[in-house]
Image (cartoon, grey):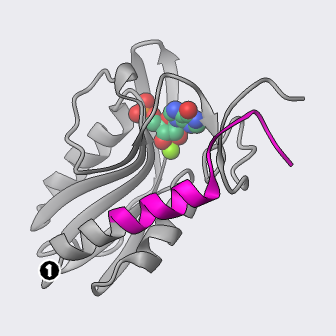
Amino acid sequence: MVVGTPFLTVEQIQKKNRELADMISADYRGKNLLAVGILKGAFIFFSDLVRLIRVPLTIDFIIASSYLKAETSGEIKVHYHLREDISGKDVLLVEDIVDTGITLNYLRERILNAQPRSLKICTFLNKKERREVDVPIDYVGFEIPNKFVVGYGLDYDNKYRNLPYISIFKNIA
Ligand code: IMP
Ligand code: MG
């Protein structure tokens, strides 16, 4: 099944994930890594990434959705937040894509309030052109243009998350 215009292949994705995991493994040696996946979108990237990281870690999740009320303002709804105590932990937030930055900025501030030992952010995709809120990102898989993409966890209307590659979305019935 091919949906939309293929943009990143399974091979490109795997190669990138190994590079990211190598950097993360080196940076977190001897630390107390808590990897936090942001659901739903990051579920596939997160599970691929943590299996390639070679330092001990624990995991938790945040389930969040954003509703765009107007072009410039998003309201974030958090359905599940960390249950792990994060004091003393080196938290790595793992996101599928950063677009306006509103979601990540909100989650970042909320986590910082709970005073982890450190907080870094890893995103699979980065759409810099669309940024409205400046949020520091430590690990980026791919910089992408201002196009709507699906697959590898990313959805349109909750569909196409199971595509193993990234496609540029076209209206498909
Ligand atoms: P932000 O708050 O605008 O950065 O929104 C980020 C969220 O919007 C992501 O976690 C995705 O759920 C969604 N999103 C943004 N761009 C895309 C896209 O191209 N495809 C699928 N979802 C997207
Ligand atoms: Mg998302």
Q: From this viewpoint, which residue is outermost toward the top?
A: 71
**Taking 13 as reference, is 166 above or below it?**
above
Number of numbered callouts drawn? 1
Whether residue 82 is visible here, answered yes or no, is no
Residue 114 point in image, percent of width and height: 17, 60
Q: Which residues are magenta?
A: 1-20
Residue 125, relative to residue 68: is it above or below? below
The image shows residue 135 at horizontal and vertical percentages of 23, 36
Q: Nearer the viewer, residue 132 or 116?
A: 132
Residue 30 in the image: above or below residue 100: below
Q: Is 83 on the left or on the right of 49, as rendered?
A: left
Report the side of 1 relative to 26 (left or right).
right
Residue at screen point 71% across, 43% down: 158
Query: On the picture, is 17 further left or further right than 156?
Result: left
| Apparent side of residue 82 relative to residue 170 in the rendered image (left or right) | left
> Is residue 64 shown to the viewer in this render?
yes
* Residue 14 within the segment the image draws in magenta: yes
Question: Which residue bears the numbered disc 1?
Answer: 31
Residue at the (46%, 12%) spot, across then down: 71
Rendered residue at 28%/73% (across/down): 34
Q: Specify whether tag 1 is near ligand 2 (CB below 8 Å).
A: no
Residue at (15%, 53%) from the top-left corner? Answer: 113
- Tell me, yes or no, whether the highlighted magenta stretch contains residue 56: no
Of residues 55 and 66, the one nearer the viewer is 55
x and y percent of residue 166 in the render?
A: 63, 45
What is the three-letter code of the residue carrying label 1?
A: Lys
User: Which corner quadrant of the image does residue 129 belong to?
Assistant: top left
Q: Which quadrant of the figure contains the C terminus?
A: top right
Query: What secondary structure is found at the residue carrying circle 1?
Result: loop
Q: Callout 1 environment at 10 Å: few (<14), some (14 to 19), or many (20+)? A: some
Q: Quadrant of residue 40?
A: bottom right
Q: In which quarter of the view is residue 155 placed?
A: top right
